Image (spheres, grey):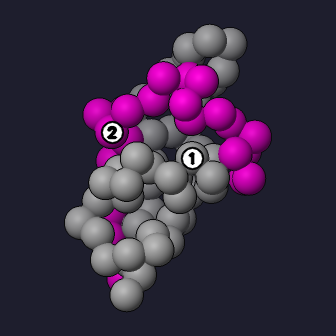
């Protein structure tokens, strides 16, 4: 059973020539039932940021502390 999360950056982050801003929120559906969208290496989150914003989550050295998330379903 999948879970849906809304993930929002906490603040502006500049790293490796990339900029992440608080208005760059995404809605992520995980493949498995998880308590956090970061549990499986943030796979779905990385894909969502690349697809929607062209933002490379890994290259920007993002981590869970940079985001807030809420469970939607």
Residue at figure coordinates x 75%, y 40% from the top left: 54
Residue 8 position within the rendered picture, expressed as x and y whole percent measured from the top left: 45, 48
Q: Mark 1 points at which residue?
A: 46
Magenta part of the chain = 50-73
When the figure is inspected, residue 71 is found, relative to residue 61, above or below; the finding is below
Residue at figure coordinates x 53%, y 58% from the top left: 44
Is residue 72 among what the camera can see?
Answer: no
Q: Mark 2 points at which residue?
A: 64
Residue 40 position within the rendered picture, expressed as x and y whole percent measured from the top left: 37, 54
Q: How crowded is mark 2: few (under 14 residues within 10 Å), some or many (20 or more)?
A: few
Mark 2: secondary structure: helix
In which quadrant is the N terminus drawn? bottom left
Front residue of 3 and 11: 3
Residue 32 position within the rendered picture, expressed as x and y whole percent measured from the top left: 38, 75
Residue 63 magenta: yes
Q: Residue furthest top?
A: 16
User: Which mark, by number, is residue 28?
Assistant: none
How many marks on residues?
Answer: 2
When the figure is inspected, residue 42 is found, relative to residue 57, above or below; the finding is below
Residue at figure coordinates x 45%, y 40% from the top left: 9
């Amino acid at each position: 059973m999948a879970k849906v999360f809304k993930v929002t950056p906490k603040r502006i982050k500049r790293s490796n020539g990339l900029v992440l801003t608080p208005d760059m929120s995404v809605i992520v559906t995980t493949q498995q039932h998880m308590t956090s969208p970061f549990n499986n290496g943030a796979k779905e989150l990385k894909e969502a940021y690349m697809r929607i914003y062209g933002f490379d989550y890994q290259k920007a050295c993002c981590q869970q502390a940079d985001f807030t998330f809420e469970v939607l379903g």
